[in-house]
Amino acid sequence: MRKTLLSLLMAEVPDNEKISLMAKEYGVGDYSRFHMDKGNECIMCGSCTSVCPTGCIKIEVGYGTRKIWNREFELLKCSVCGKHFITKEQYDYINEKCEMPEEPVCKSCKQIEIARKMMEICEL
Ligand code: SF4
């Protein structure tokens, strides 16, 4: 089981030092039967980086971009404050599940808007 998991991980991140070391330790040599192409499915939500037990999944943060699985994503800007905050792929994915505002709005601006509405309601 461990060998299979390590084979999968080697197919996923062949250049990772920690995974390579573990694969060597467990005698995992051939992982060619697994063909991973995460780049096409990934929406760059970042969840895998927060649960990876070895911390080997990294996100490279650039100006208006994020890179993971050897794929670079452009970030959308908040329509209120202009801060880059979400990939188009993640925005579209969430939009499919639940309706999002037509223009992307970041969490901070949403909170400010909600607070403003609450104040309006309380003043009535
Ligand atoms: S960033 Fe999100 S979508 Fe991409 S591989 Fe990690 S968990 Fe999956």
Image (tube, rainbow, N blue to C red):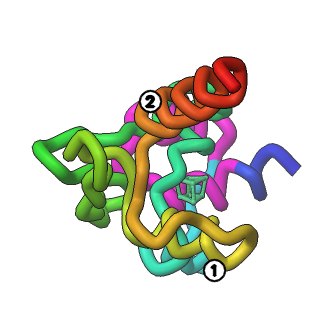
Vertically, is 58 above or below 102? above
Q: For residue 108, which numbered disc appears in the image?
A: 2
Is the C-beta of the residue carrying label 1 under 8 Å from the nearest atom of ligand 1?
no
Residue that extends furthest to the front in the rendered view of this protein: 124
* SS type, badge 2: helix
Vertically, is 80 above or below 30? above
Is residue 50 a member of the stretch shown in magenta? Answer: no
Is the C-beta of the residue carrying label 2 under 8 Å from the nearest atom of ligand 1?
no
Q: Dot 2, how many residues are within 10 Å of its Cα: few (below 14), some (14-19), or many (20+)?
A: few
Q: Position of residue 55 (x, y in %)?
A: 51, 26
- The residue depicted at 42 percent of the width and 35 percent of the height is 109
Q: Nearer the viewer, residue 61 or 56?
A: 61
Q: Which residue is mark 1?
A: 33
Vertically, is 65 above or below 26? below
Image quadrant containing the C terminus: top right
Q: Position of residue 13 (x, y in %)?
A: 45, 53
Left or right: 73 as drawn, with respect to 112: left
- The quadrant of the picture showing ligand 1 is bottom right
Q: Earlier in the sequence, mark 2 or mark 1?
A: 1
Q: Main secondary structure of the magenta part?
A: helix
Q: Amino acid at mark 2?
A: Ser
- The residue depicted at 52 percent of the width and 74 percent of the height is 92
- The residue depicted at 38 percent of the width and 60 percent of the height is 87
Magenta stretch, residue numbers: 6-27
Is residue 8 a member of the stretch shown in magenta? Answer: yes
